[in-house]
Image (cartoon, rainbow, N blue to C red):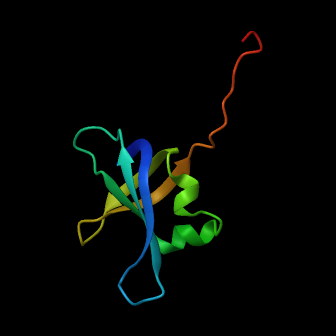
Amino acid sequence: MQVRGIVQRAELVENPAGSDRIEMVLWGQGVGPNKPRSIVVPYELLLQDPSLDPDQVHGHGFEARIEQDDNGRWVVIEIGFASGRVLRSAED
């Protein structure tokens, strides 16, 4: 499933609790009807960009490809975040 929206809240959590496995849970705004409001960025994806943290993505747009796992959680397969850069024509 494809979802896009704005990161309203993000936090790092241990899953399972007490392990060294960290995941980032994102709560999105504007994802659309019948779409999950929270998604999980798994440990394996977080390792690809160690600089990624909750404060960095808060308020930024995102687009993600997700699938539901056996526990009913929506897990990210691929995600991209807006950079926050604004492009304007030279006339403005």
Q: Residue at x 75, y 9 (%)?
A: 91
Q: Is residue 11 left or right of residue 81?
A: left
Total numbered labels: 0
Give the left or right position of residue 20, taking residue 85 as reference.
left
Query: On screen, 44 above or below 77?
Result: below
Q: Nearer the viewer, residue 68 or 16?
A: 16
Left or right: 1, with 34 as reference point: right
Q: Nearer the viewer, residue 4 or 18?
A: 18
Q: Residue at x 58, y 56 (%)?
A: 56
The furthest residue to the right:
90
Locate residue 16, reporting x and y percent: 35, 84
Quadrant assignment, res 9: bottom left
Q: Is residue 3 above or below residue 73?
A: above
Asked which quadrant contains residue 40, the reply is bottom left
Residue at the extreme bottom: 18
Kindly identify the residue that appears in the image at 46 percent across and 82 percent down. Answer: 21
For this orientation, the residue located farthest to the top is: 91
Residue 39: x %, y % from top left: 36, 58
Screen quadrant of the C terminus = top right
Residue at point 28%, 65% (across, down) = 73
- Based on the displayed image, in which of its 4 quarters is residue 29 positioned? top left
Residue 37: x, y in percent?
30, 51
Q: Which x, y percent locates residue 83? A: 63, 43
